[in-house]
Amino acid sequence: MKNVIVGQSGGPTAVINSSLLGVFKTAKDRGADSVYGMVHGIKGLLDRDIVDLSQRFKNDLDNDLLKRTPSSFLGSCRYKLPDLEGNEAVYEKIFNILTELEIYAFFYIGGNDSMDTIKKLTDYGAKIKSPIRFMGVPKTIDNDLAVTDHTPGFGSAAKYIAATTKEIIRDGLVYDYPVVSIIEVMGRNAGWLTAATALAKGEDCEGVDAIYLPEVVFEPDKFLDKVGGLLKEGRSVVIAASEGIKVKDGRYVCELSDHVDYVDAFGHKQLAGTARYLAGEVAKKFGVKTRAIELSSLQRCASHIQSRVDVTEAYNVGGAAVKAAFEGHNGEVITLKRISDDPYMCITEPADVHFIANVEKKVPAEWITEDGTYVTNELIHYIYPLIQAEITPLWVNGLPRHIRLQVGPRHN
Amino acid sequence: MKNVIVGQSGGPTAVINSSLLGVFKTAKDRGADSVYGMVHGIKGLLDRDIVDLSQRFKNDLDNDLLKRTPSSFLGSCRYKLPDLEGNEAVYEKIFNILTELEIYAFFYIGGNDSMDTIKKLTDYGAKIKSPIRFMGVPKTIDNDLAVTDHTPGFGSAAKYIAATTKEIIRDGLVYDYPVVSIIEVMGRNAGWLTAATALAKGEDCEGVDAIYLPEVVFEPDKFLDKVGGLLKEGRSVVIAASEGIKVKDGRYVCELSDHVDYVDAFGHKQLAGTARYLAGEVAKKFGVKTRAIELSSLQRCASHIQSRVDVTEAYNVGGAAVKAAFEGHNGEVITLKRISDDPYMCITEPADVHFIANVEKKVPAEWITEDGTYVTNELIHYIYPLIQAEITPLWVNGLPRHIRLQVGPRHN
């Protein structure tokens, strides 16, 4: 028996299901008997919550819908495997279940934390001399994975952010009095997504006036000076800021507010957002109308505006993981390697998971302008090919059609 | 000379420029000499800030781009004409400028407030026996204009909201622990846009769990009971709420927070949003993870997901206004009249502006369920045809292409 199993983990993206499809189809094409899906990742596996994907994906229409469905079809989890020492029972349980299911190869689609799962399972497998192969399939809108040129999921999020920024700019400049709009973008530690707002600028768009990345220490006074200077020209201003910008003493900008919205049952403070805080400071100082726009989860689930390059690459890394596993690879992650800029060409290449798990890739300093308020052309050229080309949603009754795991009135 | 002039006013929509195109093309087709545009509405007219639209729209590509460009191409204003009494000078100035320009007909694309401008100009014109014809072209995402079946701009906003709600639902249900997501939708006094979230529900989508409209008095205790009941089923919850919901004593829900983010230079308090407030209450009471998602200005400027029905109707009301004016109508607004539901058919019909200006149309009580937490099928059937069919963006370099009035590095 050549059964394989696949799971999705961490925050969803607009193309994580294309990687699932890449694993499923390639495994079937290469002779896998059953392709199982873990419902809610490794946590579901521990609960034996498993589906046979052949029962779910029966024809090309299902496949086309899967590509266009946002969020993780199989459900996700935030569960991190404990360290092996003292927790052998969890590992034994997982390997027992995998052995019962006669699993030949195990695929996990996710980001940093999920690659840690692959690393730990690989290490344990080596220890007990298990024949099961473990392969990681990269995914994250944050683009913060090491080794790989970029991550599937980033391109579509960047395309959504750049397109939406263009629309916000058109909207923001409509009045005959100055308005300061602040767009808050995801990416707590890495500014890749915030940098994507730079792609809005072009012949038909003024672009944003400043970009604040988490890689640069945020200086509130300089920020207000900058806004003041722009306002002096008598015009509206649009600024992009990462949710993760921090001041010198290490506090997040959103922590500067003396106000806590509420403290939840776990003692987590819910803070006003970065954009709201900055908009407040601008309004206080300059008395102008402000707008705080959080792109929130829309930027990771907007599958109605996918990048075709991203969809294709997401599919390819899933397929390449299966190919590699079937050819004997183990304990690796499929990375993307850019071999040409013009024309843009990227190939897949397996890399040792130990170099990838738990490492965060940030925007390099040389891709940020000297004053720290914009990005360089190199960074724009890096992102540019990743947002190219489109996949049209399958419109049914005026709305994009999706496919979901559970059918019936309610979900999981 | 048969010159005409057109302006755009109030909040922008995704299709307000289709109405501009409808006015421009129909006027040219019917023999207008010059078609002028007021930059920033009536306020720009008073400053003689005027452009000749024939210089801007030269070919079919310009027209196609204009249809797909969000926000008001000509710029907008929030300026309301003062009452005639004691303010004759303003009116004299406007009519002098119009006479200088040899204006035959005047078109104003806007909502309630803008129709008030048409009313006042018509009344003053009648008083001084001016031959100039004044016609209103309806526009507002809020769908709160009287007499007309619906307003251009609403359908595209509703389509964006329903599509985005589907994506948020897929994203919100991904984890194996309960999350309560609250989507805040525009429409301070009328719940039409919030009701559009109901269209998300279908074979492929669970839909939202509850909908709170501003037409219903909001009861915080009942809301928490409802959420508690849904959480008891052990599942994630997605709720839509209008920004304008109010409690019994007339305060907005967002005013219930004891916190004021900041007070601006004009003394305006900036309040935490409705969704943030409700998310805070849910987190405090149930200790679950919550998400507050404000669709903010995205819902009115997302021209990358226009309804084709809406684009066509927006164009048609512009064209019908020109036709009516050229046939002698004056002091009227073009309304949409639904003459058939299945198949959906709508015609245009001029109506006296005095019945439309300053009147707000709300969601009727019989289209809201008895417990006030959802909408009826009648309301869903009413919105359904308005979100149908698509217009593909003109993608250039991976992003939707727009057209703008000013060319050069910065804008108006």
Image: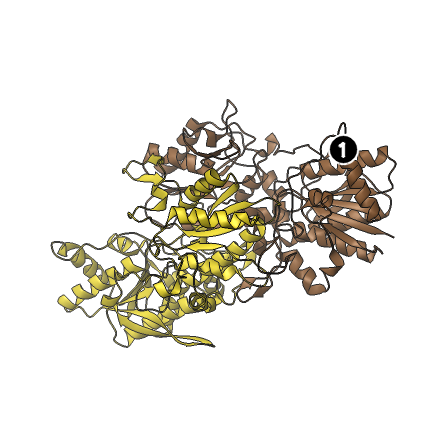
Chain colours: A yellow, B brown
Which element carries disc 1, helix, strand or loop?
Answer: helix
Asked whether the viewer can see residue B169, the reply is no
Query: Which quadrant of the view contains residue A27?
Result: bottom left
In this view, B232 is above or below A45? above
Residue bearing the label numbered 1: B354
Q: Residue at x 60, y 31 (%)?
A: B366
Q: How many marks?
A: 1
Taking depth in this image into account, of B38 and A12 the one nearest to the observer is: B38
Q: Chain of mark 1?
A: B
Q: Is residue B388 found left or right of B286 in the rendered image?
A: right
Q: Residues within 10 Å of mark 1 (few under 14, many from 20)?
A: some
In this view, B258 is above or below B177? above
Q: Is residue A151 found left or right of A304 in the rendered image?
A: left
Q: Residue at x 31, y 39 (%)?
A: A269
- Residue B87 position within the rendered picture, expressed as x and y whole percent measured from the top left: 75, 31
Q: Is residue B59 found left or right of B14 in the rendered image?
A: right
- Residue A362 position within the rendered picture, expressed as x and y whole percent measured from the top left: 33, 61
